[in-house]
Image (tube, grey):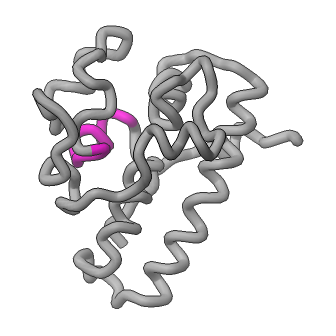
Amino acid sequence: MFVNKLQFKPDLTPKKMLELGVFGGWYFEKKFDEYPASWFKKAKISSNGFDETLNCFGINAGLTREEWNKKGWIFSGDPLGWFQWYCRYTIGRRLPEIDEIQISRWRAFGPRHIGGIKKNCEKGVLNCRKRQRQALLQWGYNPFF
């Protein structure tokens, strides 16, 4: 499978995602030394565990890391999952085989959820399908349409 990396253009950077509020503020579990400090200046970060109120839409969206493991979505190089891969990709790391898998997953995720929101919500009504919007945000898609 060949994925054109030019087609990988998330709407949001990791920094912006962290500022808006993703993964209950606990994705990195206080371990952010490998990432630019600027990403965390305005980030919504929890000091003691997952806090859904820190999420942009104030709700929990998605499965647990244990469930990600069971589904085969965790790869040894990025034990925290897709967002860890995206952060590392953003700062320049390249793992061609894993990059193709993760970019394919990203490309498959967005259209399905964007379509569900557009089909069922009036334009600009952000409290419609908040769980899907939060999930889109956590995959680097703009949920504010």
Query: Residue 87: x, y in percent?
Result: 45, 27
Say whether residue 90 is visible.
no
- Compared across the picture, whether 67 is left or right of 19 comes to right
Quadrant for the N terminus in the image: top right
Q: Name which residue lies at 58% across and 33% down.
A: 74
Q: Is residue 19 magenta?
A: yes
Quadrant for the C terminus in the image: bottom left
Q: Is residue 96 magenta?
A: no
Q: Which residue in the rendered view is the most extreme toward the top?
A: 33
Please state the extent of the stretch shown in magenta in the rendering: 14-23
Q: Name which residue lies at 14% across and 34% down.
A: 46
Overall secondary structure of the magenta section = helix
Query: Residue 104: x, y in percent?
Result: 70, 47
Q: Is residue 141 above or below residue 41?
A: below
Q: Which residue in the rendered view is the most extreme toward the right?
A: 1
Query: Residue 132: x, y in percent?
Result: 40, 68
Quarter of the image where one finds residue 134: bottom left
Quarter of the image where one finds residue 43: top left
Q: Name which residue lies at 46% across and 28% down.
A: 80
Query: Residue 102: x, y in percent?
Result: 65, 39
Say whether residue 78 is visible.
yes
